[in-house]
Image (spheres, grey):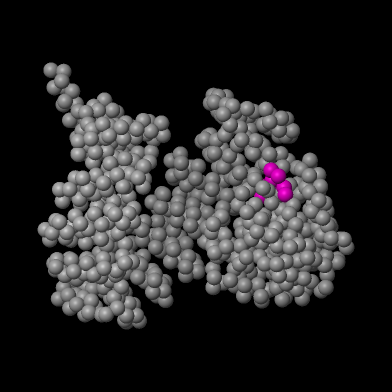
């Protein structure tokens, strides 16, 4: 057996050699889910069995091969190929790498499975944002594949059914020399199908031959590999079962034919089919009889998604349990499986699994998922575990900010403040993050620490007027005299932007200087770039000063501009109503409804305004439509049901009001509004029966 050795090692990427001699070397690039683990690299065992020399390029995380690291590493790899024929080979992130660095490795051919064209948001944001979070302009990683990057013979494999991969493939196929090999019903399992059908060696051999292969050769090879591949049948079954679940007839003809071609216990598939046909009893019986062997050699994560998509909760839990048992070391798969247990309320098991998974070496690369679960479970200890290890500054800051949010939600002020102090140290070189830390301190009422941070930032940016105003805000509770003096100095500058005048209006108000607050917001409105919120605030301050006519005029202008969102329009409508202008309030209600006609909040607000101005029929039509829609597809919260009940009661729809109250109390048994309305309806009914 050939000994493995590290050829080159950088901060982000390493190269590993497995030299078996021969005229051909395959340089493999790792998919995003297979990060550095000792001397393992992608396809190492497969190529070893085939007697093919290989060099594996492996990232330390999903980073799409940062430019500087690759510059250093590729020179060493190229020297070690010793003039032999080079084939680059990769999947996903690795498929991208196989294309991107083929020319620099002097590759004669490239085999790229389901590659990305780019992960730069400037390139792919309109159609594929799956991986843009890994893009870092300072690292120069994941930049688009260009013509100059390619070998003379580049093959990309993809399934047209995967729309996002197909769009990436379309961009790549626009480059001369790129040839497409379409693999129907394979999704991202083509390599496993080839391996299952013993086709990989033939694939490499075609690339290493003296005559460049044709795409048709590969299509024939894949088609032949399917015949001996249980993985392909498994993929095809998933597709047909999903199609069956989405069809009206739920015909199982095609699924039954495929089941006849499998060589394993089919009870799991049969349970899914029975569930989709509406036979819940048979589905449950078949699932209970399903043995562990039914899950051998199938893609459990894919079947987890299928079970979820068809709404078979018990099947989803069964597959999730298999994933946790069989793939306990696969962090990504286990995290997906935990969603099933969260949905069914088994939070204790989720917590135990997360504690276990957090110890995995690749756990920090999936920190966003751990944060998501920690928030759902309200368990900060899951995130605290990560802080004991070495982490990149950005990852540590992300965890700490998430912890502050969680501690604040839990009402744990001491731990929240402790975390903020840790953040201040972690983010000492990031003014943007330090400003966030100061803002959090204010929310936790740690004003002194907020002031300390803001003063430190202001010393390095004396002309940052918004920051200077933040310092004034932090100073008001302890030293109003100095705060008033500093505010006067700041607002004497000649080049203040509108945001400063708006911010100053709030500070003047806190300092009990209503006139100065009004003058400041009026100056902000004078800027053409000011948003609708500024004009709304001007109307509010005018109303407080008793200048009703001017306040109405500002609201009328705001409505005519039509730039506000529904929530802003509702706030302005409430102000118009409080100013006694019911017609203007109704116009705001109609405007917000036009922007969001299906939003229950918009419907309820317009119905209320119509009722107030005497249009009972209009209000009834809106409320009845909302009531019927919610009966078909419930989405209202307990509070919204209570508001709907109030409006129905106000227009005399007592029967529906009672039903709405019942819905509200089912969601929030202690809801004061619903309980009070229920008592009122009961009293009215008692009086009617006397």
Residue drawn at x 39%, y 63% as measured from the top left: 401
Residue drawn at x 67%, y 41% as measured from the top left: 235
Q: As drawn, is 392 to the left or to the right of 176?
A: left
Which quarter shows the N terminus? bottom right
Measured as percent of width and height from the top left, residue 474 is found at: 24, 71
Seen from the viewer's position, the closer of residues 612 and 636 is: 612
Q: As drawn, is 656 to the left or to the right of 138?
A: left
Q: Is residue 65 magenta?
A: no
Q: Is residue 443 visible?
A: yes
Seen from the viewer's position, the closer of residues 619 and 443 is: 619
Measured as percent of width and height from the top left, residue 312 is found at: 53, 34
Q: Can you say whether 95 is above or below 664 in the image?
A: below
Q: Residue furthest top?
A: 690
Q: Residue furthest right?
A: 210
Majority SS type along the magenta span? loop
Instruction: Examine the image and state in which quarter residue 533 appears.
Output: bottom left
Instruction: Examine the image and state in which quarter residue 504 appears.
Output: bottom left
For the record, the magenta segment spans 182-189
Measured as percent of width and height from the top left, residue 70 is found at: 65, 72
Q: Is residue 363 visible?
A: no
Which quarter shows the C terminus? top left
Q: Can you say whether 607 is above or below 581 in the image?
A: above
Q: Is residue 184 magenta?
A: yes
Residue drawn at x 15%, y 51% as measured from the top left: 579
């Amino acid at each position: 057996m050939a000994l493995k050795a590290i050829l080159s090692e950088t901060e982000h990427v390493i190269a590993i050699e497995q030299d078996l001699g021969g005229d051909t070397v395959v340089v493999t690039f790792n998919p995003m889910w297979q990060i550095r683990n000792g001397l393992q690299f992608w396809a190492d065992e497969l190529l070893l069995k085939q007697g093919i020399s290989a060099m594996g390029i492996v990232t330390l995380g999903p980073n799409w091969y940062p430019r500087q690291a690759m510059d250093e590493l590729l020179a060493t790899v190229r020297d070690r190929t010793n003039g032999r024929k080079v084939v680059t080979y990769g999947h996903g992130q690795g498929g991208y790498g196989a294309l991107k660095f083929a020319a620099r490795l002097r590759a004669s051919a490239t085999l790229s499975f389901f590659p990305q064209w780019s992960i730069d948001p400037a390139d792919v944001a309109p159609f594929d944002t799956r991986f843009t979070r890994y893009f870092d302009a300072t690292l120069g990683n994941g930049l688009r594949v260009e013509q100059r990057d390619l070998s003379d013979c580049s093959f990309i494999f993809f399934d047209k059914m995967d729309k996002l991969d197909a769009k990436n493939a379309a961009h790549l196929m626009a480059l001369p020399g790129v040839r497409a090999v379409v693999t129907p019903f394979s999704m991202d399992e083509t390599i496993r199908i080839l391996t299952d059908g013993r086709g990989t060696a033939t694939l490499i051999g075609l690339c290493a031959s003296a005559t460049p292969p044709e795409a048709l050769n590969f299509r024939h090879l894949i088609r032949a590999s399917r015949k001996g591949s249980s993985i392909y049948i498994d993929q095809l079954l998933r597709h047909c079962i999903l199609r069956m679940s989405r069809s009206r007839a739920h015909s199982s003809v095609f699924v039954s034919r495929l089941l006849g071609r499998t060589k394993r216990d089919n009870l799991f598939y049969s349970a899914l089919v029975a569930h989709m046909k509406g036979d819940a009893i048979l589905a449950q019986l078949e699932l209970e009889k399903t043995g562990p062997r039914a899950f051998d050699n199938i893609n459990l994560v894919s079947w987890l998604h299928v079970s979820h998509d068809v709404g078979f909760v018990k099947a989803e839990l069964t597959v999730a349990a298999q994933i946790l048992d069989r793939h306990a070391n696969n962090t990504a798969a286990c995290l997906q499986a935990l969603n099933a247990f969260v949905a069914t309320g088994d939070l204790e098991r989720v917590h135990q699994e997360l504690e276990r998974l957090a110890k995995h070496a690749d756990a920090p690369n999936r920190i966003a998922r751990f944060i998501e679960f920690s928030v759902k479970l309200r368990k900060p200890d899951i995130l605290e575990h990560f802080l004991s290890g070495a982490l990149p500054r950005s990852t540590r800051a992300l965890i700490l900010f998430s912890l502050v949010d969680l501690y604040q939600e839990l009402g744990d002020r001491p731990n929240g403040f402790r975390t903020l102090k840790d953040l201040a140290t972690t983010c000492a070189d990031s003014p943007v993050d330090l400003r966030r830390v100061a803002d959090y301190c204010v929310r936790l009422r740690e004003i002194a620490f907020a002031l300390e941070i803001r003063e430190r930032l202001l010393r390095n940016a004396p002309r940052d007027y918004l920051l200077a105003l933040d310092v004034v805000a932090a100073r008001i509770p302890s030293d109003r005299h100095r705060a008033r003096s500093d505010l006067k100095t700041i607002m004497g500058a000649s080049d203040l932007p509108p945001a400063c005048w708006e911010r100053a209006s709030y500070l003047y108000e806190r300092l009990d200087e209503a006139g100065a607050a009004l003058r400041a917001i009026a100056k902000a409105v004078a800027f053409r770039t000011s948003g609708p919120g500024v004009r709304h605030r001007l109307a509010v301050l005018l109303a407080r000063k008793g200048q009703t006519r001017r306040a109405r005029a500002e609201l009328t202008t705001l409505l005519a501009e039509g730039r506000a969102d529904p929530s802003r329009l509702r706030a302005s409508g409430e102000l118009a109503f409080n100013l006694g202008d019911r017609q203007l309030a109704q116009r705001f209600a109609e405007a917000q409804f036009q922007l969001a006609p299906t939003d229950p909040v918009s419907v309820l607000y317009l119905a209320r305004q119509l009722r107030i101005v005497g249009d009972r029929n209009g209000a009834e039509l809106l409320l009845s439509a909302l009531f019927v829609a919610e009966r078909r597809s419930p989405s209202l919260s307990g509070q919204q049901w209570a508001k709907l009940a109030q409006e129905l009661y106000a227009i005399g729809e007592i029967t529906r009001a009672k039903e709405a109250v019942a819905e509200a109390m089912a969601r929030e048994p202690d809801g004061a509004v619903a309980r009070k309305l229920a008592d009122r309806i009961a009293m009215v009914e008692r009086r009617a029966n006397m």
